[in-house]
Amino acid sequence: MPAAVNWIVLLGVFGCLVGPLDGSAGDVDPLYRNCVDRCEKTSHVGEIDLQSCRFSPHNVSTNGSWYARESLYLHWNQWSCRSDCRYYCMIRREKEREELGFAPVKYHGKWPFIRVSIFQEPVSSLFSVLNLIMHFHGWLSFFLLVCYKLPLKPLSKRTYYEYTGLWHIYGFVAMNAWFWSFIFHSRDSDLTEKLDYSSAVAFLGFSLILSIMRTFNIKDEASRVMVSAPLLAFLTTHILYLNFYQLDYGLNMKVCVGIGISQLFLWAVWAGITHHPSKFKLWTVVFGGGLAMFLEIYDFPPYGGYVDAHSLWHATTIPLTYLWWSFVKDDASFRTSLLTKKTK
Ligand SMILES: [Zn+2]
């Protein structure tokens, strides 16, 4: 792939490609549906007794304890009851299907994963946290470099590097996206899904703004505002639309792909014409991102119930994130040395 940050693009694009949560082969199966219905009413799946369904609206009595009647508590239980019923019925159906020699199928848009403690997709959750840590490490070392190691302007005490503020915001937006990715992979609900989607769109959108600023060398405030204002307005409208009007997966995918391709194109052209000393880091990220994309396209069911293509894709972004921040730090050092030479 001829661009430097296609892995960033991938995070956003595939964050957007999760797809509708109902209508997968697994959850349209009447045996599965009956199992979930029965479970919500009786709080049992075979031998398994589900504590979370004890206080579901089907079972709660009007003279129960006060906390059982509290709406928030009831809401929480109703949600975890449904989630638990879906999980145990899925495991049961998958076992039956396996005995009959059938391959695993998706349920509500997701492969059948084996839970570990409270984590629904433990491997993807773990890799999301590692990505988050990588971004924190990258951002922190960038902060220490530009603020303490590189020379500052003598009068204003500000950095010579013109993109310091933008990379700080980028670090925050990236960490926010990985945080919600961790929450979404740990516990899937309407709210965590919307937060994950919104954060992925924000991350992807801000990456586009940053790519325009860096590749076009936009340095003055007025031009930056002129370029980013319409993009920020568009992103905000899109996020509000997804959250409060309709979570339209098709539209979101088009928007994400559009934003992704635009910044890919920009970095590709820039990588082609620039004489940046850290070009090789860009190309490594490009190559790694290309391989990662094949992983995501080849969507296989979880191996052993844990490791699927999506989680492996989250794994590949960990070293790429390290390299990416390393490139950003090189860029800061490179620009600073150019500018200080000029001023001498
Ligand atoms: Zn994910």
Image (cartoon, rainbow, N blue to C red):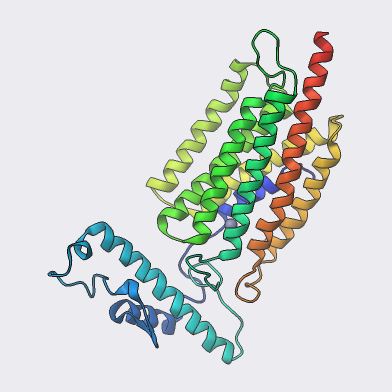
**Residue 62 pos. (x, y %):** 13, 69
Image quadrant where residue 338 sits: top right
Answer left or right for 23 relative to 219: left
**Residue 186 pos. (x, y %):** 50, 61
Residue at position x 35%, y 70% in the image: 81
Residue 28 appears in the picture as rendered: no
Query: Which residue, as the protein is rendered here, is positioned at the far bottom?
Result: 100
Image quadrant where residue 136 sits: top right
Query: Which residue, as the protein is rendered here, is positioned at the far left?
Result: 63
Q: Is residue 236 above or below residue 225?
A: below
Residue at position x 46%, y 80% in the image: 29
**Residue 159 pos. (x, y %):** 69, 19
Q: Nearer the viewer, residue 82 or 49?
A: 49
Answer left or right for 192 relative to 6: left
Answer left or right for 201 relative to 321: left
Q: Quadrant of the C terminus?
A: top right
Ligand 1 is found in the corner quadrant, namely bottom right
Residue 234 appears in the picture as rendered: yes
Residue at position x 45%, y 54% in the image: 192
